[in-house]
Structures are given as C-alpha cells and as structure tokens.
Image (cartoon, helix red, strand yellow):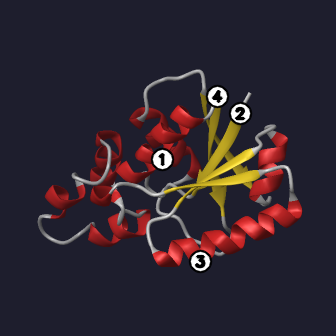
Amino acid sequence: MRTAVYAGSFDPPTNGHLWMIEQGLELFDHLYVAIGSNPSKSYTFSVEDRIQMLRDSLPSCDRLTISHFDNRYLVDYAKEVDAHYILRGIRSPGDYEYERVMRHINGDMARDITTTFLMPPRDIAELSSSMIKGLTGPEGWEDIVRRYVPAPVMDKLLEA
C-alpha cells in the first residue's frame, strides 16, 4: 500500500491545501494530512480548530486521516504511520529551494521515505495561509478571501 503524509500548519486551510489533498488521494492509497506544530510560530487557530476546518472542508474518505504531530521531525511521524512518501507543494522558486534542502535532510534521516513534489495550477499557486491572514480585516475582505478558502474556513474566519 502506498501511504503518504502531507504536512503543514493549515492555519487556516486554503483551496490550495485542498487541491494538494485531492491530488494526494489520486496518487496514494492512503493520505495522512498532518498538522505540525512549530514552537517558533504563533498560530491564529488551535490545532483542534484546524483539524475541524479540514474535516468540514473535505468529503469523508476512509483513505484519508487528519492528524497532528508535535515536537517530532516529519520523517519520524511518517515512519510512525508507516508512510513511505512525503507530499509537498511547490508554489514558487523560494518554495523549491526550501523543499529541495528539506528533501535532502529528510533523505539523510530516512532513506526509505521519498518526497513527492506537486505544483498547483496557476489560479491557486500563490495561496498560502499567511496570505489569507494578511488579507483578512480591511473593509470588504470577506469578498476577497471567500475565493481562496473553503466555506467552513470562511465561516471560522468570520467568527474570529
């Protein structure tokens, strides 16, 4: 069975994240969507809220597991769930450089785990959680942000 992990902060989940998850389900037999915690980052939403937003934004699927890992390397989490693939998205040259380095470091730590890169289509290639948070607030933000996030995430943003 081909099992992959797609990890990120998902703070909040975007349509770009959903595209990656949909592609991951096409490519792999099982996909773990794992919310990682970085102690040097501050988050807008709790882990529980991010898990719930993902669950509410995705159709139920027995080949998809939404989870969380804390204070561990991604490759160690992948080993724990018996995944042999890490799924990563590349939106820009900066992403490529970062992900290239991480692929090599992860390969040093776990030679049996392969990193697979996907490039999203142009209409969502620029999306990031940080961009969404940066767009939130000014007058009329709702109409702009609504294009880039699933409905359950928009509902949560309106509550915040």
Say if mark 2 contacts mark 4, CB within 8 Å: yes
The residue indicated by pointer 1 is 20
Q: Nearer the viewer, mark 3 or mark 1?
A: 3
Tell which of 69 and 27 is nearer to you.
Answer: 27
Q: Amino acid at mark 1?
A: Met
Q: Amino acid at mark 2?
A: Arg
Say if mark 4 contacts mark 1, CB within 8 Å: no
Q: Residue at x 29, y 41 (%)?
A: 151
The residue indicated by pointer 3 is 97
Q: Residue at x 79, y 60 (%)?
A: 73
Of label 2 and label 3, which has the lower sequence position?
2
- x and y, in percent, of residue 38 in the image: 66, 67
Of label 2 and label 4, which has the lower sequence position?
2
- x and y, in percent, of residue 103 in the image: 71, 65
- x and y, in percent, of residue 31 in the image: 62, 36
* Label 1 Cα crowd, 10 Å radius (few <14 / some 14-19 / many 20+): many
Of label 1 and label 2, which has the lower sequence position?
2
Q: Residue at x 48, y 40 (%)?
A: 23
* Label 4 Cα crowd, 10 Å radius (few <14 / some 14-19 / many 20+): few
Q: CA distance from mark 3 to mark 1?
A: 19 Å
- Label 2 sits on a secondary structure element that is loop
Q: CA distance from mark 4 to mark 1?
A: 15 Å
Q: Residue at x 53, y 64 (%)?
A: 43
Q: CA distance from mark 4 to mark 3?
A: 28 Å
